Image: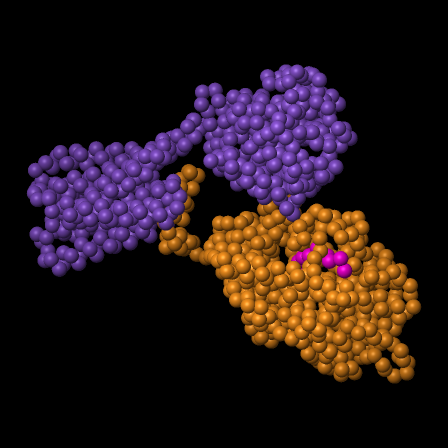
C-alpha cells in the first residue's frame, strides 16, 4: 500500500510539469487560513492630528519622564535604574513595551513582530555588551575582544539560505550562475568592505562604527552620504546584477528601502560596521531567539523592575509637549497624556524629558518648537509588514540546502522568512511559526502606507502564500493561521543627506531639559543604535541632575 | 460496427500512450534523471511506432485476425512490461536498461501496427477523408484521456504495475470484442478466442497478485527476505532475514546484523557499566531496538532503565515481533524498563532526573537535525542528568572511516568539561567502530566482567583503548549548534569511503 503510493507519487512527479499541475488540481484549493490584521496603533496615533483632546484632570510631577518604551526608552530606563535612579516614568502608547522588538505568542510558541536578531556586538558597543552580560548571554568579561556567548542564543546552523531557480543554496549571496567575472566582483566588493571595516582615522575612530555616532568624521567618508548606494556601486564599476541584488536586499532588509534610495554611507555601514567576534562562534553569527529581539526588550524591563519597581505606564498617548510654559511650570516640561482606556488626560510635569518615540511624531506633539518640527519633517519613514504563519508541521521543501533560520527568495518583493522554532533544542520540531517580512522599497513610502491601510488581510495572505508556494508546494495545506502585522512608519530611511545633515544633528544634541533617544536620531533602525541613544540620553540626564554614575559608553 | 471500431481506436490509442508513460515513469523512478529518461523513452517509442507503421504494409491478408493477434500481443507484452522491468531491476540493474529499451521498442512496433490496420479495415466502409479525420480524432482523444488519468487517478491509486496490467487487460478486451464483432469473417474464431481468454486470465492473475509481486521485487533489492517493512513519520523501517541473520535497516542504512550485533552492544555497554557497581538508574537515548537494554539488564543491581526513542513504531516493533523479542531477550517488556517516545533533546530539557549510567546510541550525524544530538549544547544538557560518579557512553561513528568526525565528538565532549575516554571495537558488519566514555572524573577500563559476554574479555579490553596510527587523534573543532562542523566532517569522510 505504502510502496504503491510512493511509486505513484514518484511517477506522478516525474511525469513532468503538466502532470504535476494536474495532480495539484485534484482537490479544491484550501480556504485561506484564519488570522488577524493588526498593527501599531493607527487610530490612536491619528488622534494626534485632532485638537479635541481634553484638558488634563490630574497633574503628576516626576523628575524624569521617558516617552516611548521601545528599545531607546527601555535602554534609558535601564541605565537610570542601574545607576540607582528610580524617579522616572516610562510612558508607552502600546499595551506592551518593546516597540519594534515586540513579539507575539500562540499555542505553538513565540514569534517576532519586528526586529529578530542582534549581530555579535562590536567592541565599541559597550552598553549592549553590558546588557548582554547582565542577561547572562555574554559570559565572562564584557569588554573582551572575543567573549563567549550562551550557545542557545547563537543562531544554530544553517543560518541562512537562498531560493533561486527551483533550488535552495546555502548563504544569501547568489552562487549558481555567477561566472568568473561576477565572482571577481564579489571578491572585490567584500575586500573593499573589509578595508572599510578595518579603516580608522587619525583620531583612532573607526570609519564605520556601531554605534554610528562613534564613526570617523573624515570628509572623504562623509561624502558617501551624498550619493546613493547604487550610484556608489556603479562608480566603483560594480555591475554584476547578482551583486546588485545582494546589496539591494541588504538595504531593504535593514532600512526598508532599496539601494537607489539609501545613501552609500548607510549602505556601506551595513557591511563595514560589524566586526564583533566570539570565542565560540564565527563572526557572522547572530544572536537570536524564537521571539526575535523581544527577549532583549523584556530583559531590560525586568532589570528595571527588579531594581526600582514598576515604572511603565502603557496605553498612554503623549499628544502635547511644552518646554517653557507660564510661571508655575517654569523650569519644567509639560507632557499631556491621553489615556484612552480612562478617557481622560493626565499632565506630567517633568524636570527632564527623554523623548524615545519616533521623530515623525515630533511636529504633532511639540507645537511650540517649530525648529524641531521642521527638522523632523525632513525625515522619511519606510512602511513594513510582518506576517506570522503558524504551521501544523514543516512544509515540503524543494531541493538543495536544508531549512535554515533565515530563508530568502530571490527576486521576491518580500524579504523571506525566519523560522521561529529554529533555536529550540529539538531534533524534529513539529509545529512552527514562520515570520515573513515585507518592505515596500519598490514604491514611494506614502504609497506603501496607503497599500497597508487599504489592503485586507485575505489579499496579503494570498500574496504571501503564493510566494511561499514556489519553494513549499503544500504551504497552504500546513498553514493553520496567518496573522498580519502592519507598521506604517516602521523605520527612518537613511536617504542621502540624512546622516550628515543638520536635522539629525539637532536631535542628537544635548538639551537643557530635553533629549532624544530613538534609533531615528542615528538615522536608521538598529538595536545597537536605539540602545546607544537611550543610554546616552540617560547618562546626560543623570549628569544634568548631578547624579554620579558609571558610564556605559566609555 | 464502425462506431465500435472507432471506440476501439480510442482504447488502443490510450493503451499506447499509457505504456509509453509507464516506461518513462518507471525509468525515471528507478534510474533517476527524469528528463533524460522521458526523452529517450518517448523518442525510441515513437521511432518504434514508425517501424510498426511501415511494417503494416507487409500484412496483406486476414487483416482482422492479424489485428486481433497484434492486440493480444500488445496486451500481454505491454501489460506485463512494468512488472517485468521491476523484477529485472531488482535482480540486477545492468540489464535493466537493455530490457527497458527492448520492451519499449517491442511495444512501440506493435502499437505502430494497430492504427494502420484499423484504418485499412475501416477503409471498406468509409471515404478517405472521413476515415482519416475520424480515426485520428479518436486516436488523439484516447491519448488525452490517458495523459490526464495517468497521473491523477491511475498511478496514485493503482501504482505503476497495476496500471500497466489494467491497460493490458483493456487491449485484450478490445481483441476479444473484435473477435466477437467479426466472428463470421474469422476463419480461426475459436483459436483466437482461446488465445484471448488465456491472455485475459494471465493478466487478471497478475493484477490480483501485484501487491505480492511488489514486495517480492523489493525483497530482491535487499537480497534477503523482508520480514517487516514500515514507513513511520520519522523513517522507513525494514527488517530482513537470511537464514539466521536478522538485519535492521533504517532509511536503507544498516543498523545491525544479528550475526555480530553482540560485538557492538557489548562494546557499547560493558566497558563503562562494568566499572559502575553502584549504578541503579540507567538512561538509554536512541536504541529503540532494545539490544543495549538487553546488555544493561544483565546487571542485577540495575533498578530502572529509561529508554527514550523518538519513533514509537520502533519500540513497538521490538517489543512485539517474536524474532526481534528473542533477539533483545524481551528487554523492552522487562518491568524495569520504561519506554518513552520523545525527542531526546526535548525530553532532557523537560526532565531533571539523574542517572548513574547513560547510553547515547543515536544514528550517525549525517544531517543537521541529528547533528544537534552531538553538539556541545546537547552534551551540556546530558551532563546535567549525570549523578555524581555517573558515566555516559556515546556511539561515535568509525574512527577509521570517519576519523575527524570521531575525534570531533571527543573534542566536543571535552569542551563542556567532561573527561572523555575513547575506544574502539571491530564489528564486521560496520567495520572498525568507535565509542567514547564520558564522565566528570577520569575513567579506568574494567579489570573483569561480572556478566556473561561473547566478545569482551578482561585480557583484550586494554587493547580497545589503544588507537593504532591510522586512527590516532587528529585536530577537530568543537561541534557547536552554530557551526555543526561534525555534519560537514562526516559528509566529507563518508563520501570518500562510499565509491
Q: What residue range appears in magenta?
A: A113-124
Q: Where residue A487 appears, x then y in whole percent?
A: 64, 68
Q: Chain drawn orange, letter?
A: A
Magenta span contains residue B426: no
Q: Quadrant of the N terminus of chain A?
A: top left
The answer to whether residue B453 is above or below residue A28 is above
Q: How is the image coloured?
A: by chain
Q: Where on the picture, by quarter, is residue B415? A: top right
Magenta segment's dominant SS is loop
Q: Residue at horizontal 66%, vertical 41%?
A: B477
Is residue A241 depicted above or below B261 in this figure? below
The hue of chain B in the figure is purple
Please say if B59 is above or below A219.
above
Residue at the location (32% across, 49% down)?
B39
- Residue A31 can be seen, yes or no: no
Which residue is more in the foreground, B291 or A267?
A267
Mark yes or no: residue B238 visible.
yes
Q: Is residue A180 left or right of residue A22?
A: right
Please tell me in which quadrant of the rendered image residue A57 appears. Answer: bottom right
**Viewer-proximal residue among B241 and B31:** B31
Q: Position of residue B427 (x, y in %)?
A: 56, 24
The residue under the point 64% across, 35% down is B474
Residue that extends furthest to the front in the rendered view of this protein: A202
Q: Residue at x 39, y 30 (%)?
A: B220
Q: Position of residue B31 (x, y in %)?
A: 38, 41
Image position of A57 (left or right of A7): right
Image quadrant in which the C terminus of chain A is located: bottom right
Q: Quadrant of residue A244?
A: bottom right
Amino acid at each position: 500500500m505504502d510502496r504503491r503510493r510512493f511509486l505513484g507519487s514518484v511517477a506522478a512527479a516525474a511525469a513532468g510539469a503538466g502532470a504535476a499541475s494536474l495532480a495539484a488540481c485534484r482537490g479544491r484549493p484550501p480556504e485561506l487560513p484564519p488570522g488577524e490584521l493588526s498593527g501599531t496603533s493607527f487610530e490612536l496615533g491619528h488622534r494626534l492630528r485632532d485638537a479635541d483632546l481634553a484638558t488634563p484632570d490630574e497633574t503628576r510631577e516626576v523628575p524624569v519622564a521617558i516617552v516611548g518604551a521601545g528599545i531607546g526608552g527601555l535602554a534609558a530606563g535601564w541605565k537610570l535604574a542601574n545607576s540607582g535612579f528610580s524617579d522616572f516614568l516610562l510612558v508607552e502608547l502600546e499595551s506592551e513595551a518593546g516597540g519594534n522588538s515586540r513579539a507575539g505568542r500562540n499555542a505553538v510558541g513565540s514569534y517576532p513582530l519586528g526586529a529578530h536578531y542582534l549581530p555579535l556586538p562590536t567592541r565599541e558597543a559597550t552598553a549592549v555588551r553590558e546588557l548582554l552580560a547582565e542577561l547572562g548571554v555574554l559570559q565572562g568579561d564584557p569588554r573582551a575582544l572575543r567573549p563567549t556567548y550562551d550557545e542557545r542564543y547563537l543562531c544554530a546552523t544553517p543560518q541562512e539560505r537562498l531560493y533561486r531557480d527551483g533550488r535552495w543554496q546555502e548563504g544569501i549571496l547568489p552562487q549558481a550562475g555567477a561566472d568568473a567575472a561576477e565572482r571577481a566582483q564579489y571578491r572585490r566588493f567584500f575586500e573593499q568592505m573589509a578595508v572599510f571595516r578595518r579603516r580608522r582615522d587619525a583620531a583612532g575612530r573607526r570609519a564605520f562604527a556601531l554605534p554610528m555616532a562613534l564613526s570617523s568624521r573624515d570628509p572623504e567618508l562623509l561624502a558617501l552620504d551624498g550619493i546613493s548606494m547604487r550610484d556608489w556601486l556603479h562608480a566603483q564599476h560594480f555591475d554584476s546584477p547578482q551583486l546588485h541584488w545582494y546589496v539591494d536586499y541588504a538595504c531593504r532588509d535593514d532600512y526598508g528601502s532599496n539601494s537607489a534610495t539609501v545613501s552609500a554611507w548607510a549602505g556601506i555601514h551595513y557591511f563595514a560596521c560589524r566586526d564583533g567576534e566570539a570565542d565560540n562562534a564565527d563572526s557572522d553569527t547572530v544572536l537570536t531567539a524564537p521571539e526575535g529581539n523581544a527577549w532583549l526588550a523584556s530583559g531590560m524591563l525586568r532589570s528595571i523592575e527588579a531594581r526600582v519597581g514598576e515604572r511603565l505606564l502603557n496605553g498612554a498617548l503623549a499628544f502635547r509637549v511644552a518646554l517653557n510654559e507660564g510661571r508655575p511650570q517654569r523650569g519644567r516640561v509639560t507632557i499631556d497624556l491621553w489615556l484612552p482606556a480612562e478617557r481622560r488626560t493626565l499632565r506630567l510635569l517633568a524636570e527632564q524629558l527623554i523623548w524615545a518615540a519616533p521623530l515623525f511624531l515630533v511636529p504633532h506633539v511639540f507645537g511650540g518648537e517649530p525648529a524641531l518640527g521642521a527638522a523632523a519633517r525632513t525625515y522619511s519613514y519606510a512602511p513594513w509588514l510582518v506576517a506570522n504563519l503558524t504551521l501544523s508541521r514543516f512544509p515540503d521543501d524543494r531541493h538543495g540546502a536544508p531549512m535554515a533560520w533565515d530563508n530568502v527568495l530571490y527576486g521576491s518583493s518580500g524579504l523571506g522568512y525566519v523560522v521561529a522554532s529554529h533555536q529550540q533544542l529539538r531534533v524534529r520540531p513539529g509545529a512552527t511559526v514562520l515570520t515573513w517580512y515585507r518592505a515596500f522599497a519598490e514604491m514611494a513610502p506614502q504609497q506603501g502606507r496607503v497599500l497597508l491601510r487599504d489592503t485586507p488581510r485575505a489579499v496579503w495572505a494570498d500574496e504571501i502564500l503564493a510566494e511561499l508556494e514556489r519553494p513549499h508546494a503544500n504551504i497552504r495545506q500546513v498553514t493553520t493561521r496567518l496573522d498580519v502585522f502592519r507598521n506604517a512608519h516602521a523605520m527612518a530611511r537613511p536617504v542621502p543627506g540624512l546622516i550628515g545633515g543638520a536635522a539629525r544633528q539637532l536631535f542628537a544634541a544635548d538639551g537643557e531639559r530635553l533629549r532624544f533617544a530613538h534609533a531615528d536620531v542615528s538615522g536608521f533602525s538598529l538595536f545597537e543604535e536605539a540602545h546607544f541613544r537611550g543610554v546616552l540620553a540617560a547618562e546626560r540626564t543623570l549628569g544634568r541632575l548631578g547624579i554620579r554614575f558609571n558610564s556605559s559608553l566609555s | 460496427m464502425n462506431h465500435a471500431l472507432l471506440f476501439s481506436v480510442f482504447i488502443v490509442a490510450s493503451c499506447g500512450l499509457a505504456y509509453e508513460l509507464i516506461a518513462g515513469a518507471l525509468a525515471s523512478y528507478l534510474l533517476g534523471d527524469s528528463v533524460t529518461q522521458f526523452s529517450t523513452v518517448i523518442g525510441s517509442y515513437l521511432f518504434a511506432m514508425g517501424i510498426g507503421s511501415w511494417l503494416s504494409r507487409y500484412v496483406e491478408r486476414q487483416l482482422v485476425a492479424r489485428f486481433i493477434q497484434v492486440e493480444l500481443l500488445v496486451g500481454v507484452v505491454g501489460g506485463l512490461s512494468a512488472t517485468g522491468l521491476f523484477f529485472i531491476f531488482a535482480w540486477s540493474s545492468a540489464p535493466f536498461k537493455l530490457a527497458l529499451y527492448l520492451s519499449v521498442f517491442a511495444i512501440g512496433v506493435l502499437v505502430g501496427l494497430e492504427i494502420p490496420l484499423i484504418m485499412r479495415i475501416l477503409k471498406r466502409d468509409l471515404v478517405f477523408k472521413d476515415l482519416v479525420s475520424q480515426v485520428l480524432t479518436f486516436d488523439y482523444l484516447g491519448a488525452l484521456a490517458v495523459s490526464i488519468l495517468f497521473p491523477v487517478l491511475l498511478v496514485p491509486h493503482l501504482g505503476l504495475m497495476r496500471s500497466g496490467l489494467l491497460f493490458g487487460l483493456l487491449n485484450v478486451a478490445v481483441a476479444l470484442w473484435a473477435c466477437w464483432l467479426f466472428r463470421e469473417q474469422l476463419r480461426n474464431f475459436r483459436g483466437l478466442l482461446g488465445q484471448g481468454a488465456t491472455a485475459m486470465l494471465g493478466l487478471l492473475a497478475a493484477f490480483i497478485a501485484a501487491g505480492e509481486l511488489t514486495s517480492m521485487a523489493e525483497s530482491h533489492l535487499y537480497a534477503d527476505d523482508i520480514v517487516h517493512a514500515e514507513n513511520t513519520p520519522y523513517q522507513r523501517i525494514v527488517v530482513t532475514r537470511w537464514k539466521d541473520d536478522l538485519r535492521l535497516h533504517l532509511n536503507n542504512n544498516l543498523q545491525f546484523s544479528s550475526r555480530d550485533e553482540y560485538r557492538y552492544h557489548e562494546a557499547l555497554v560493558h566497558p563503562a557499566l562494568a566499572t559502575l557497581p553502584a549504578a541503579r538508574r540507567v538512561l538509554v537515548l536512541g536504541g529503540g531496538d532494545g539490544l543495549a537494554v538487553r546488555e544493561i539488564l544483565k546487571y542485577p543491581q540495575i533498578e530502572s532503565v529509561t529508554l527514550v526513542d523518538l519513533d514509537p513504531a520502533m519500540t513497538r516493533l521490538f517489543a512485539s515481533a517474536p524474532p526481534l523479542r528473542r533477539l533483545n531477550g524481551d528487554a523492552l517488556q522487562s518491568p524495569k524498563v520504561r519506554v518513552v517516545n520523545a525527542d531526546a533533546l526535548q525530553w532532557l530539557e523537560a526532565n531533571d532526573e539523574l542517572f548513574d549510567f547513560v547510553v547515547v546510541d543515536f544514528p550517525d550525524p549525517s544531517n543537521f537535525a541529528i547533528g544537534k544530538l552531538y553538539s556541545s549544547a546537547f552534551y551540556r544538557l546530558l551532563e546535567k542528568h549525570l549523578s555524581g560518579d555517573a558515566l555516559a557512553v556515546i556511539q561515535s561513528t568509525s574512527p577509521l572511516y570517519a576519523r575527524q568526525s570521531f575525534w570531533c565528538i571527543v573534542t566536543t565532549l571535552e569542551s563542556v568539561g567532561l573527561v572523555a575516554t575513547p575506544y574502539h571495537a571491530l564489528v564486521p558488519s560496520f567495520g572498525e567502530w568507535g565509542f567514547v566514555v564520558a564522565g566528570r572524573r577520569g575513567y579506568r577500563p574494567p579489570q573483569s566482567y561480572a556478566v556473561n559476554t561473547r566478545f569482551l574479555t578482561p585480557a583484550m579490553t586494554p587493547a580497545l583503548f589503544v588507537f593504532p596510527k591510522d586512527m590516532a587523534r587528529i585536530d577537530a573543532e568543537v561541534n557547536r549548534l552554530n557551526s555543526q562542523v561534525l555534519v560537514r566532517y562526516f559528509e566529507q569522510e563518508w563520501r570518500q569511503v562510499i565509491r
